[in-house]
Image: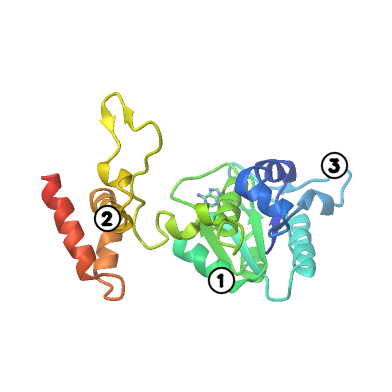
């Protein structure tokens, strides 16, 4: 997959992407992450990349010409149907479903990480296909938001995760929170690992994990559980029974 990230701080992006699953995906050429710096397209001797907002007020905007040129450079390198996304708190809030559908589209992505107070609205209208937010808070730049998108999508590229890291087991992948996990030692300060996990009974372990996932989602994210319960294709008798058991034990 090709992702072009437009940023005034390419070193920040490359550093952050050099580790773990992302770093390995890049090394193995499953992800091609290119940074394009608007500063390289600035014309004046100071290579200016910010400009004052019309109407006055505090803060600067990204200067139109270098940014527009950087976007056009990314578009000319990317495939014709590349999707241009501006990272912004005003955007659609991202979630696992959006990442799954984006990864499945297999289109190149051009992510714009803004700095300062943002970018000229006309650039959004003419060059941007979607605006994405990672949550209701304001970051001082779009790089961290863009990296969230890069990370979440990369782990969905077939082959990036090994079997034992499978994305299918992740929280949210099936609309539920993840179950609790345990590793050695068997006992920490008299707190033992749930017995069923030591039983070797794969069916009992599957049911226990599903029950815990349902119970946690009920406790922590009832909104997610509501959505699942109202979708006949994702709610069945087993889930209803396991959730009822969890609730009874939780009283
Ligand atoms: N840029 C600044 N804040 C952001 C947010 N919450 N989501 C996406 N991009 C941003």
Residue nearest the viewer, comparing 75 with 58: 75
Query: Residue 163: horizontal and vertical position, in percent?
Result: 53, 57
Query: Tag 1's secondary structure?
Result: helix
The figure's colour scheme reads: rainbow
Q: Which residue is mark 2?
A: 204
Residue nearest the viewer, comparing 215 with 130: 215
Note whether 124 is above or below 246 in the view shown. below
- Tell me if I can see residue 88 in this picture: yes
Q: Which residue is mark 3?
A: 46
Which image quarter holds the C terminus?
top left
Image quarter of residue 97: bottom left
Gap in Å between the C-alphas at discs 1 and 3? 42 Å
How many dots with numbers?
A: 3
**Ligand 1 closer than 8 Å to the CB at disc 2?**
no
Counting residues from the N terminus, which is met first, the one under dot 2 or under dot 1? 1
Residue at the spot x=67%, y=68% of the render? 108
Query: Residue 168: horizontal and vertical position, in percent?
Result: 45, 60
Tell me whether the residue at label 1 lies in contact with that at label 3, contact meaning CB atoms closer than 8 angstroms: no
Gap in Å between the C-alphas at discs 2 and 1? 33 Å
Q: Which residue is mark 1?
A: 104
Tell me whether the residue at label 2 lies in contact with that at label 3, contact meaning CB atoms closer than 8 angstroms: no
Query: Tag 2's secondary structure?
Result: helix
Which image quarter holds the N terminus?
bottom right
- Tell me if I can see residue 61 in this picture: no
Residue nearest the viewer, comparing 20 with 118: 20
Residue at the spot x=73%, y=51% of the render? 27
Disc nearest the viewer among 1 and 3? 1
Task: Report the side of 109 relative to 152 (left or right).
Answer: right
Residue nearest the viewer, comparing 238 with 142: 238
Circle 1: is it few (<14), some (14-19), or many (20+) Cα within 10 Å? few
Q: Residue furthest front?
A: 200
Task: Report the side of 148 relative to 8 (left or right).
Answer: left
């Amino acid at each position: 997959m090709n992702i072009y990230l437009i940023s005034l701080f390419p070193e920040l992006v490359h550093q952050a992407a050099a580790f773990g699953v992302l770093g390995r995906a890049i090394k193995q050429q499953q992800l091609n992450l290119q940074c394009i710096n608007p500063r390289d397209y600035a014309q004046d001797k100071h290579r200016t990349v910010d400009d004052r907002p019309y109407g006055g007020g505090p803060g600067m905007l990204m200067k139109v010409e270098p940014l527009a040129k950087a976007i056009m450079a990314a578009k000319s390198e990317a495939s014709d149907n590349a999707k241009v996304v501006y990272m912004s708190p005003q955007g659609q809030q991202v979630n696992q479903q959006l990442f799954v559908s984006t990864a499945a589209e297999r289109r190149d992505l051009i992510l714009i990480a803004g700095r300062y107070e943002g970018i000229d609205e006309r650039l959004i209208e003419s060059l941007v296909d979607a605006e994405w937010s990672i949550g209701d808070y304001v970051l001082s730049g779009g790089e961290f938001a863009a990296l969230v998108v890069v990370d979440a999508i990369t782990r969905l590229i077939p082959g990036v995760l090994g079997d034992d890291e499978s994305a299918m087991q992740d929280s949210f992948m099936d609309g539920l929170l993840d179950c609790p996990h345990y590793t050695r030692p068997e006992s920490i300060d008299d707190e033992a690992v749930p017995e069923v996990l030591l039983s070797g009974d794969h069916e009992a372990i599957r049911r226990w994990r599903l029950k815990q996932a349902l119970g946690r989602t009920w406790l922590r994210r009832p909104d997610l559980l509501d959505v699942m319960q109202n979708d006949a294709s994702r709610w069945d008798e087993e889930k209803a029974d396991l959730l009822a058991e969890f609730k009874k034990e939780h009283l």
